[in-house]
Amino acid sequence: MAQELSENLSEEITDKTSEEAVQNAIKDPAPSSLKYTLGLKIRMDDIHQTTQSTKLRPVVGLRYGKWRVGIGDGEEWLRFNSFRKEPSLSYQWVEKRNVDLGLSLRVHNLNTGEAFDVFEPGRKTLRGRLLSNLRINRRWTAGIELTHDLLSRGDSSTVSLGVSYAWPLSSHSELSLNTGVTWAPAEHWRTSAGSHRTGIEGLTTSIGSVGSGLSYKHSLSKQWAWFSILGINKDVGNVAKLSGPNSHVSGQVGFLYFGR
């Protein structure tokens, strides 16, 4: 779970400065026109293990008013250094300069512990999410997320807390650092760990995952950008006592096109 706190942070860029984007968002918080983002990314999983893999995946985002599908659009990315981005259908209930509150649904893969990927096999469930971001100042953002398995297939509920720091390198590039922790009932940790790992009977309700990430984003023009991400997720507490690997290192590199 906490790995997701440190992913996809760098997919938030246009050629404007973040302060200009914030002002534009205030003037027009819920435009009625359809906006979109398209792209490709190379995702690398288990980088430090023998099970490492490299996958080419599409990136898709749509925005219409307060409705979002996937990553939304470039203006939304610059309003907040959100500690969480994932493929989902969401509704931005509150969308102000320094705070937002959204509701979303997503298909969750119980076998991989990730958002739905049409190319990945495995048992799926439907996860509901309540997510809020607080823009503390121009560089710091904090977030809290609550999720629940709406089909009761073992994913249970989770509470995640995260914080990110944005370091502008120029008017066209930015480096971001982020970290987060996830608390969940024992049922969630058993499902995410997998039945093949020794010791899952001893898991309890607790904080079981800590994630950190480093990301870079760079705009090439008004409509093109590229990003790179390095994320590290580590099991803690009783989850860290399970057999098998207890840390996960992943990376992404991708290009994006913003439809305006």
Image (spheres, rainbow, N blue to C red):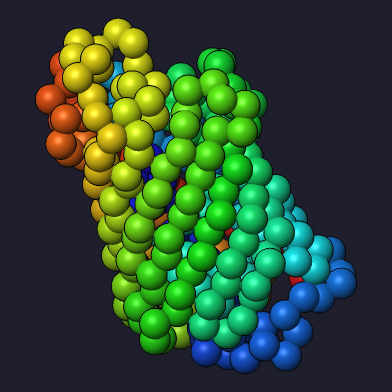
Decide if residue 62 is on the left or right side of residue 40. right
* Residue 21 place in picture, x, y as percent: 60, 84
Could one spot residue 232 in this view of the protein?
no
Name the quadrant containing residue 249.
top left
Q: Residue furthest left?
A: 241
Image position of 149 with respect to 135: above or below: above
Residue at x 67% of width, y 83% of height: 25
Name the quadrant containing residue 240.
top left
Q: Quick one: 140 or 146, which is closer to the camera?
A: 146
Image quarter in which the C terminus is found: bottom right
Residue at x 51% of width, y 44% of height: 147
Image quarter in which the N terminus is found: top left
Image position of 246 with respect to 123: above or below: below
Decide if residue 93 is on the left or right side of residue 5. right
Name the quadrant containing residue 235.
top left
Decide if residue 248 is on the left or right side of residue 25. left
* Residue 102 place in picture, x, y as percent: 62, 61
Residue at x 35% of width, y 60% of height: 162
Residue at x 62% of width, y 26% of height: 151
Could one spot residue 99 in this view of the protein?
yes
